[in-house]
Image (cartoon, rainbow, N blue to C red):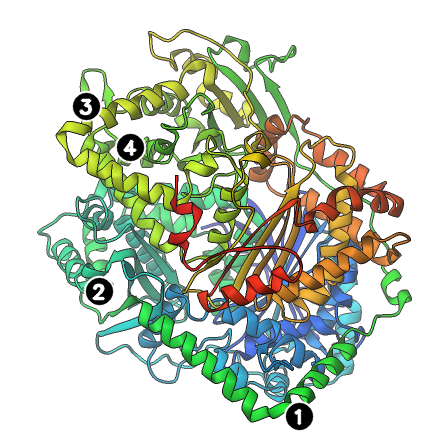
């Protein structure tokens, strides 16, 4: 382990005692201080880059389902003693080069977050934020609007209620909650639904309980301030001085008991549960299996080893459980994955996803056989692969500190805050890579004993999540009856009184803060912000890096020189040449590239060895359609580009160039493997189509894009049809050859040198010092029969794939989805399609003004509980402007509110609040700077710049252009781009809701001249047609 600071604690800057100075994985300096006056703990991690993050964390414990930790988290933001106005915190945050604030509630802690560009705004905002955390107003009016109320129409609403309504009855939520309740029997906080159960939120949760909960847990001794970024320690202490003074002036709060110290009742016997959940179809369910694991207090090494063991069992297609449950002709699941809940007595669990209904009862028995055979020695652990898994875990941990350094360090410190007791404990958590290095040398006996102790000989909990149409129908009927009874119970006078109560609460909450309170915080300069450095070259650059001449390499290449400990290799393949008929093959082709046998010389390397060797040689190996944010049935931006990404250690550089050649040109298409991979993808559809947000986006892509696009061919239902047919063809010897020829033909097309570009990001000096000449290995990239053709990156912007209006048969639709209770909404119109368009900065500011935290939409949409989330965003690569609602309780009313607000700002002589205007620009500037917060982000932004057709200073230049936008620009830009979004003749709309609400929603939009075609089920929709 890294050396522990053993010097005696010493006073520093008055009230603060340095407890220890350590390093996270020997990379990031971490310093822990404690106030000798208030007990406040401050941990500063010196993460490099342009942003400073704050994680203000409290240990919180609950023993019921009232959701007090979660409701309190929401109410914190509605005003404090010194700033007694709802939303003032986020408005001030927006002025501090932040984009509002945020928080999360976990089972054992609540964490409040803020991120600013640079340290100046951070130091200004921190004491204001802490005033809200320690001294919130917690008014009854805030509770009514933010947590729960009954509307004048007799419907239940409130932001927290809306959030929980959106997730409580999802299959995964029901299955997980049943599992954790069984794993932690008796009196134990780990079994509580800290978000709140809807029944409790309606009947039991109240504001007095919330206030009492705050008194019990929100104390300085229980508060740890984790600060990650470049900030001077003495500046932090100076900023905290008024907070310390206020805490001291309030006097003592009596003795404090640290949460999570009570003994956890044992799990003494195995449990098997059947949990139905509402669903439109009854094809596939899920099975979750859990065990109690080692203690997060005393057994960190063993807990880390359990995580490694579960990773060995489940990770990649050659792991024991994937091989036995997924990679077979008649699979038990589409995926097996693991997780670990780091509690004082931890929970280890496996998740079997998309399990066919007729196999739900057999998963546990099969698992018992497999684990039993490994424990008895009838089947041997593959120690070579196990050590590969450990080595890759080391690399992934180090990579995480590069791609997500703020979150990575913060979560280590949160674990210590909850369960650590000494500075040695903190050092252990910050340096788990040292544990992993020790584990590389643990003998087989160690791992077998671990397997026996925790997974074979211990009691287990098995929960079978059963999809149920009957449950869906019963819930719909039950909810309708409950609301009718609620209306009858309240009567006309009661409903009117509720309406008046809500109106008064809203009026109380929306009292604007004094102008001088907002303007008292000045907007910081961006001049001193520390951006990550980058130097970029291409094959066409006149000036090449003296150590890496790209002109000598046989394919077109981009090179980024960045401060990284890894090498990122992107192979970009243009799919424009693929015909409409062949395009549906792309998802299965790309997924199979990493899981097929390869020809190596005269030998055939089995797919199992390919997967194992890739695991050994890379930190990450993935394929995708489009760039960032892609998934199995959702293409990322620039969807006509397919990508293979390898992330690796510099010493594996030459080996991974060989891998690119082997994966692109030497894979062998075997019917059995293609059949298994196709079934795996097809089985995943059942899970994806239960997610309202995915479905509403898929519907919009279907409305917007033409049949020659990858968006069209990759859609979930079309893929399910295609793959089902493909599997049938692969089962027949007569049609197998046709499939193999077609998929090989597509592979040859997209890997042709003229369709290839390599994008490489690395630290050139470090790479050269470790491997010598970086050019030479690339000279053997292409097969011997290839013609060297170097062409610049061929970019197909997604807007070129939009469906012409004349070809449109359906413009708008509402689709019923029985497994959801909230609704999801998406609307688009044609807009800016060039990232260099001079109107883009003004449009971004216009939309930020409306959508910023505590801006007009926040108050009227989220503030009134009409939707949990919303966005208005342009996507120039698609040439579209989007409006969307996430988990809406009333999407018709939410839309009316948004349209009314937009209309007001489109009218002649529209008034723009100067303070909101300034905070919109400030928060937008932060969001743009945040795109480059880590090395991983810088690499990603550089790659995107080639597609966008902009230089590497684009984001920095955009910041300057945003600063120059005026309100006159907003008056000019709104009618041009935003008005068409609400014109029924110029927009497209997709809505997903419970089937019982489809008619009502369609009727509501019809009153606004927006005609939605109603599909009672997803299978009835156009997504199910070619």
Snapshot quadrant of residue 507: bottom right
Q: Reply above or below: 125 against 574.
A: below
Q: Is residue 370 above or below residue 134?
A: above
Q: Residue at x 33, y 49 (%)?
A: 684
**Mark 4 vs mark 3: which is more N-terminal?**
3
Which residue in the structure is indicated by mark 2? 453
User: Number of numbered discs present?
Assistant: 4
Above or below for 878 versus 790: below
- Percent position of residue 81, x then y: 78, 78
- In the image, taking residue 917 as reference, residue 260 lies left or right, namely left
- Res 33 visible: no
Q: Report the Cα–Cα distance between label 2 and label 4.
A: 30 Å
Rounded to the nearest angstrom, the CA distance separating label 4 from label 3 is: 14 Å
Looking at the image, which residue sits at the far left? 378
* Residue designated by label 4: 613
Q: Secondary structure at mark 4?
A: helix
The answer to which of 43 and 491 lies nearer the viewer is 491
Q: Residue 469: x percent and y percent? A: 32, 68
- Could you tell me which secondary element the residue under label 3 belongs to? strand
**Circle 2/circle 1 CB separation < 8 Å:** no
How many other residues sit within 10 Å of disc 4, few (<14), some (14-19) or many (≥20)?
A: some
Alpha-carbon span between mark 4 and mark 1: 72 Å
Q: Name the residue at 59% across, 55% down.
A: 1011
- The answer, for residue 404, to whether it is visible in the render is yes
Marks 4, 3: nearer the viewer: 3
Q: CA distance from mark 1 to mark 3?
A: 80 Å
**Disc 1 designates what residue?**
493
Label 2, label 1: how far apart the Cα atoms are: 63 Å
Dot placed on the residue nearer the N-terminal end, 2 or 1: 2
Badge 3, how many Cα within 10 Å: few under 14, some, many 20+? few
Front of the two marks 4 and 1: 1
- State the SS at label 2: helix
């Amino acid at each position: 382990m890294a050396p522990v600071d053993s010097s005696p604690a010493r006073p520093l800057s008055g009230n603060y005692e340095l407890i220890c100075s350590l390093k996270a994985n020997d990379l990031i300096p971490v310093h822990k201080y404690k106030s000798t006056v208030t007990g406040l703990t401050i941990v500063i991690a010196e993460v490099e880059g342009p942003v400073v993050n704050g994680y203000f964390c409290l240990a919180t414990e609950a023993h019921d389902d009232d959701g007090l930790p979660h409701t309190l988290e929401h109410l914190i933001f509605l005003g404090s003693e010194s700033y007694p106005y709802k939303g003032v915190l986020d408005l001030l945050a927006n002025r501090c080069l932040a984009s509002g604030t945020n928080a999360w509630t976990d089972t054992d802690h609540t964490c409040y977050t803020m991120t600013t560009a640079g340290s100046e705004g951070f130091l200004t905002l921190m004491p204001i934020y802490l005033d809200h955390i320690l001294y919130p107003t917690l008014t009854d009016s805030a509770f009514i609007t933010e947590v729960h109320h009954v509307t004048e129409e007799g419907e239940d609403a409130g932001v927290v209620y809306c959030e929980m309504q959106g997730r409580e009855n999802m299959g995964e939520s029901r299955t997980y909650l049943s599992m954790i309740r069984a794993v932690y029997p008796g009196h134990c906080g780990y079994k509580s639904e800290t978000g709140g159960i809807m029944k409790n939120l309606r009947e039991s949760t109240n504001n007095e309980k919330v206030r009492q909960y705050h008194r019990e847990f929100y104390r300085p001794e229980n508060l740890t301030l984790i600060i990650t970024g470049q900030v001077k320690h003495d500046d932090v202490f100076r900023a905290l001085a008024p907070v310390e003074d206020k805490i001291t002036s309030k006097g003592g709060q009596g003795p404090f008991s640290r949460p999570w110290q009570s003994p956890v009742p044992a799990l003494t016997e195995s449990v098997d549960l059947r949990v139905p959940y509402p669903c439109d179809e009854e094809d596939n369910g899920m099975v979750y299996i859990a065990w109690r694991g080692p203690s997060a207090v005393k057994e960190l090494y063993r807990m880390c080893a359990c995580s490694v063991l579960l990773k060995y069992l489940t990770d990649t297609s050659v792991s024991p459980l994937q091989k036995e449950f997924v990679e077979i002709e008649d699979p038990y699941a589409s995926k097996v994955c693991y997780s670990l809940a780091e509690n004082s007595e931890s929970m280890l669990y496996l998740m079997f996803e998309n399990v066919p209904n007729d196999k739900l009862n057999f998963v546990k028995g099969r698992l018992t056989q497999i684990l039993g055979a490994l424990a008895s020695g009838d089947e041997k652990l593959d120690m070579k692969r196990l050590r590969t898994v450990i080595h890759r875990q080391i690399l992934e941990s180090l990579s995480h500190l590069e791609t997500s350094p703020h979150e990575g360090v913060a979560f280590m410190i949160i674990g210590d805050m909850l369960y650590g007791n000494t500075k040695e404990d903190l050092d252990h958590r910050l340096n788990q890579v040292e544990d992993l290095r020790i584990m590389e040398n643990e003998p087989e006996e160690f791992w077998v004993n671990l397997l026996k102790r925790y997974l074979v000989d211990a009691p287990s909990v098995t929960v079978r999540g059963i999809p149920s149409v009957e449950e869906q129908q019963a819930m719909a009927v039950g909810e309708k009856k409950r609301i009718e009874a609620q209306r009858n119970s309240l009567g006309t006078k009661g409903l009117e009184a509720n309406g008046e109560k809500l109106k008064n609460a809203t009026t109380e909450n929306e009292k604007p803060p004094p102008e001088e309170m907002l303007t008292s915080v000045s907007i910081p300069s961006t001049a001193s912000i520390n951006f990550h450095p980058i130097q970029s070259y291409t094959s066409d650059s006149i000036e090449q890096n003296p150590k890496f001449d790209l002109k000598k390499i046989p394919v077109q290449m981009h090179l980024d020189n960045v401060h990284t400990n890894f090498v990122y290799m992107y192979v970009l393949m243009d799919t424009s040449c693929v015909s409409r008929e062949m395009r549906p093959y792309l998802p299965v082709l790309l997924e199979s590239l990493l899981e097929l046998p390869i020809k190596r010389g005269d030998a055939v390397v089995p797919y199992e060895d390919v997967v194992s060797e890739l695991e050994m040689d890379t930190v990450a190996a993935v394929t995708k359609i489009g760039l960032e944010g892609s998934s199995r049935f959702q293409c990322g931006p620039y969807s006509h580009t397919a990508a293979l990404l390898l992330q690796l250690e510099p010493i594996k550089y030459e080996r991974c160039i060989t891998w690119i050649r082997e994966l692109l040109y030497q894979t062998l298409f075997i019917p059995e493997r293609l059949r298994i991979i196709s079934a795996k993808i097809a089985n995943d559809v059942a899970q994806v189509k239960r997610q309202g947000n995915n479905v509403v986006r898929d519907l919009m892509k279907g409305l917007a894009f033409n049949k020659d696009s990858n968006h069209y061919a990759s859609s979930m239902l079309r893929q399910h049809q295609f793959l089902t047919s493909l599997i049938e063809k692969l089962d027949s010897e007569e049609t197998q050859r046709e499939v193999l020829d077609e998929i090989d033909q597509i592979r040859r097309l997209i890997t042709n040198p003229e369709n290839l570009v390599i994008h490489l990001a690395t630290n050139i000096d470090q790479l050269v010092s470790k491997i010598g000449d970086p050019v030479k290995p690339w000279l053997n990239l292409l097969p011997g029969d290839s013609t060297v053709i170097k062409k610049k990156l061929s970019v197909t912007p997604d807007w070129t794939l939009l469906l012409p209006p004349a070809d449109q048969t359906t413009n708008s639709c509402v689709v019923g989805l029985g497994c959801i209770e909230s609704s999801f909404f998406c609307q688009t119109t044609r807009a800016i399609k060039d990232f260099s368009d001079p109107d883009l900065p003004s449009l971004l500011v216009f939309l930020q003004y409306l959508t910023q935290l505590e801006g007009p939409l926040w108050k009227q949409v989220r503030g009134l509980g009409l939707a949990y989330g919303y966005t208005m965003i342009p996507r120039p690569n698609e040439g579209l402007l989007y409006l969307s609602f996430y988990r809406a309780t009333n999407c018709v009313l939410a839309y009316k509110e948004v349209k009314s607000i937009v209309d007001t700002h489109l009218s002649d002589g529209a008034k723009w609040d100067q303070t909101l205007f300034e905070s919109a620009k400030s928060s937008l500037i932060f969001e743009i700077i945040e795109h480059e917060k880590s090395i991983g982000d810088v690499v990603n932004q550089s790659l995107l710049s080639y597609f966008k057709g902009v230089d590497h200073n684009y984001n920095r230049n955009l910041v300057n252009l945003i600063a120059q936008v005026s309100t006159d620009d907003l008056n000019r830009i709104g009618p041009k781009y935003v008005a068409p979004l609400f014109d029924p003749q110029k927009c497209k709309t997709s809505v997903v809701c419970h089937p019982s609400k489809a008619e009502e929603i369609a009727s509501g939009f019809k009153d606004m001249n927006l005609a939605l075609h109603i599909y009672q089920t997803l299978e009835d929709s156009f997504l199910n047609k070619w």
